[in-house]
Structure formats: C-alpha cells, structure tokens
Amino acid sequence: MSPPDAEAGTARTAAVERTADRALVAAARHSAGRTAAVLGCTLGAAAAALAEPAVLGHTLDLLLRRAAPGPAWTLLCAAVIAAEVVLDAAAARLSGEVDGRSTARLRRLALAGLLRTAPHHAARHAPGETAARLTAHAAEAGKVPAAVAHAAAALLPPLGAVAALFLIDPWTALAFLAGVPFLVLLLRTFARDTHTSIARYQQVQLETAGRLTEALAGARTIAAAGTAERERARILAGLPELGSEGRRMWQVYGGTTARSAALMPLLLYAVLAVGGIRLSAGAIGVGELLAAVRYAGLAAGIGAVTGGLAAVVRGRSAARRTAALLALPVLGHGRARLPEGGPGTLELRGVRVVRGGATVLHDISLVIPGGATVAVVGRSGAGKTLFAAVAGRLTDPDAGRVLLDGVPLPDLTAEALRREVGYAFDRPVLLGDTLGGAIAFGAGPDPGPREVRAAARAAGADLFVRRLPHGYGTRLADAPMSGGEVQRLGLARAFAHAGRLLVLDDATSSLDTVTAREVERALAREIRPGTRIVVAHRLSSAVRADLVVWLEGGRVRATGPHAELWRHEPAYRAVFAAGAEQEGEPGTEPGAEPGMERGAEPGTEPGMERGAERDTDQDTEREAAR
C-alpha cells in the first residue's frame, strides 16, 4: 500500500472508531435512566460487599469478647448481606433491558445510515457481512453501556478494599500494594492482546458470512456446475483461522486468570502473614484480621475487573464493525421543491464521477429538454449506468451539478425527489407482500387498484398476473416468475409512480423484442408525460428516441437524432453491431437490431420483406411517429 493509501486507510479507521464511540454514547443516552440504574445497583452491591467484611469482623470481635451483639447490629449484618444479593439481581435484570434497548438503537442507526447512502457505497460490504454487522455485532456492541457500568462498579471493591486495609492497619495495606504493579501489568496485557484477537476473530466472521451469502444467492449455479464441495471448502476456508483466533482469545483470558490465580494467594498470604504479626503484637484483633483477609481478597479480585474489561473490549470492537455502516457517506437533502407544472428539463453541468481513483464520467455538460425521450448508448463500460444513476441522484457527482427544472437535485427534499424521479432497472427487486403491493410500492400516495392494473398493462404484465390463482393478490413468495416477468413488474412499478423524470436503466433487457417494443409504445402513449432517459442496447430504443446521447470512455462523444448519427457516424453503427455479435442473435447483419431478419434495414419492424422501406431516414421517422 502506497503512503497516501496508507494514510487514507488510517484516517478511515480513525473515523470509524470515532463514529463507533459516538454511536455507543448515543445508545447509552437512549437508555440513560436504565443505565444509571444499573450503575447504581452495581455500586450499591459493591458497597454492600465492601461493608460486609467490616460488619462480620466487628461481630466476631464482639462474640470473642463474649459481648453478644445487639439486635440492631444483627439486623445490620442481615441487611448488608440481603442488599448485596438483591442489588446484584436487580442489576442483572436491568442489564438485560439496557442490552436489548442499546442493541435496537444501534441497529436502527446503522440501518438508517445504510439506507441513506448511495447504492455504490452500500455495496462496499457484501450482503452477508452487512447482515452480520446488523445482527451479531450490533448485539455484542449493545452490551457495552451495561458492561461499562459493571466494569466501573467492579473497580469499587478493589479500591475500597485497599482503603479499608489502610484503615484497619497500614502495614497490611502496604503488604498488599507490593503486588499491585503485577496486577496492573496483567490488566494492560490482557486488554491489548484481547483487542487484537477479537478484532481479527470478528473480521473472519464477516468474511465467512459474506461467502455464505454469495453461495446461497448462486445456489442454482453451484448445483448445475456440480461444485458444491468446492464451495463448501471456500465458505469454510476461514474456520482454521477462526478457531485459531478463538483459541487465542481463550488463551489470553485463561492465561490472565491463571496468573491472577497464582498471584492472589501470594497476596493473601502476605496480608495474612503481616496481619498475624500485627495480631501477635496486639495491634489488631481477630475480627480485624478476618476483615483484612476478606478485604485483601476483594482488592485482588481481578476476575471481576477482567471480565468487565473483556466485555467492553469485545463490544467496542463489534461497535466498530457496526459503525462502518454509520460512517458511509449520506445523501443529504435540502428543502426546495420543484416548480409546479415543470416540463422535466434535466441539465448536467461539468459532471465528473470518480470510482476507485479513476475518472469514470468526464466533465459531462448537456441539456435534456423537458418531455423528451433520450437514449443513452455506448459500448460496455462506457458509463451508461453511472450516467443514469447521476441523472436521478442515486449518487452524487464528485464535481459538477445536476439540475431538474432549474433546481439542483441535492437541494430537493427527499419526498419531492423520489416523487418526481423514478427508476426501472434490469434486475429489479420486488418489495411488498403481494404482486399488487409490489407494483404500488413507492414514494408518495399509493396508486389504487385501477392505476396498478393500468401500469401492469403498459408493462405487459397484466396478462400473466391475472392468470395466477389470486391475481394481483398473489403473494410474491407464491408466484413463480421468470426474469422477464420480474422485469415487467419492475417496469409496472416505475410506470405506476412515473413523475416528470423516468430513468429506465436497461429495464427491458430480459424482454423479447416484440414485448419490448410494445412497452416502448405504451411508455409514449399511456404513461404520464415526462422526460425519459433510456439506457439503450436495442436499436429500436435509439430509433424511437427524440435524442441520442452517445457515450464513449465516460465522455459524450456525440448527441443528436438517431438518424443523423446513423448516417454520418460509422462508429455509432458499430456500437449496435457489437451488441448484436455479443448477444449472438442469429440472422442479424452488423448494425441490425437483434431479432431483425437478415437484410432488413435498421428501424424496420421484424417481418418486413427484403427491399421494403429501404430509406433509413423514412424508416426512422415512421418508427418515431409510432
């Protein structure tokens, strides 16, 4: 990694860490009352634990002096013991509530960040990784507020016990303090080693989840290729490292526990030895010696501190995984609205888009007239899909501006933007419970049943939907559909919510030629008038368009009517010839639309006799008129 890349990576890591800490603070504030109650209960239980040795020691001294303790003192002993038990139980119950609320808060924040970012930013993380960040890691991070309260309370018994030792006898306290540097070293080593192993363990978990999700999405391909065993090995390839890091975590924890188990008796023996000498000298009594030994045990209670510290370290590491979703750039919105009755004029001014350090769209400036249908054509990799994404603000350009009816898209409210700018994609994802609900799904008021059916008819979906047992009420999970049928429903959804700008990103690629042309005609006649941007691979889409934007290498090579570009630009004709060769359509001439008969002129309908309508200009005009 080059120094600039390394610096950028370090900056991103620091930003994610800051975001994670802010998210944890926000989660703690969300349950501030319950978190404070957890801290209060744990501190109260710790205070009771601290009081117990002194109370029991004094009671023992009274018994040894054959002075029976009074009822008040007996009640105090019982109250201290009961308080410790009850407060511990209350803290455990409240901790569960805080964990649940904090986890829910973190998940909502992360999900909101994920949905507010541009799609290409969300795609940085594989679906399996994203799911793991929102589930397991968010749950682990949600434990941090309560864990911090427990860890803070866990410090009270050791610190209070040392203070109590000084009050009982300074020499016993000094004997214990001789071993404190070793305890501090244990805690420091434990925190450092645990953080490293937990971070790597969680990263391997994410990678495994990502590979599993990929395999599930491609289950049919894997079955057809007979590579199930190979995929199983690929998915589980991280298990050895996962096991190694897991064992390392337990080794760190076990090693710390073992060393503390060896150190604690030594400290207790030192306090007991010094206390015995002080007892024989008459400086302290038997009850005070008992209290000193109990306080030494509390002061050496590194187990509770280590456990709380481990929970905080695990939670913070998990929070950083979840916070990676919070750190994604957000597509902000303004407060402007579009002018009423605007024609949908789209203007790009010096638009430049960079991906992975390379410029993909180079300083594009053009004006698309309102109400026009524009075909965006070009070879694969020319930047057509990115152009479509910028045009409707699925992403923002790195430089330049995009305006709709004179209003910059970032200045629009989210509601105004999505109500007036619609999309249809080549691989739509259907959302909703039923087919009718999937078509109605979108911003603004839901279209009624009549509008849903009209949109489905325009997209060529009404016939196959009505053939289903429950028609538009058929559940999505119960409707077996081909890729073309899914694409028709995606088009119907876009048509049902058509605003002044509609972007079709290769949205008819899975349709046969006849159906695609029927959809194009319906788009011109039956859908709300407005500006259309069509990412085109079929020649018919370019023929029917009012204007063609020809992209090459991320630049606008030419704009104009299809007929002029076809007549004067051999390279333009070659774009469609390359498309026909890639699709492998039989019986197509170079430059002819896939599905046309050999010898037919560009722009003619399939089935025309050879020699008919030879003039391309007349042909194009006839197609556009239709």
Image (cartoon, rainbow, N blue to C red):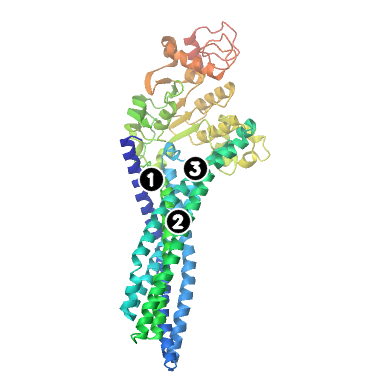
Query: For the residue carrying disc 3, how many other residues have a C-alpha within 10 Å: few (<14), some (14-19), or many (20+)?
Result: some
Give the residue at x 59% y 39%.
232
Q: Residue at x 41, y 28 (%)?
A: 387
Q: Secondary structure at mark 1?
A: loop
Q: Earlier in the sequence, mark 3 or mark 1?
A: 3
Where is residue 417? Give x, y as percent: 40, 38
CA gap, disc 3 and disc 1: 19 Å
- The reply to whether discs 3 and 2 touch (Cβ–Cβ < 8 Å) is no
| Residue 50 visible in this rendered orientation of the protein | no
Seen at 35% across and 43% down, the residue is 12
The residue that label 1 is drawn on is: 327
Residue at the spot of label 2: 252
Provide the secondary structure element on which disc 3 rests.
helix
Q: CA distance from mark 3 to mark 2?
A: 24 Å
Of labels 2 and 1, earlier in sequence is 2
Give the image quarter of residue 52: bottom left
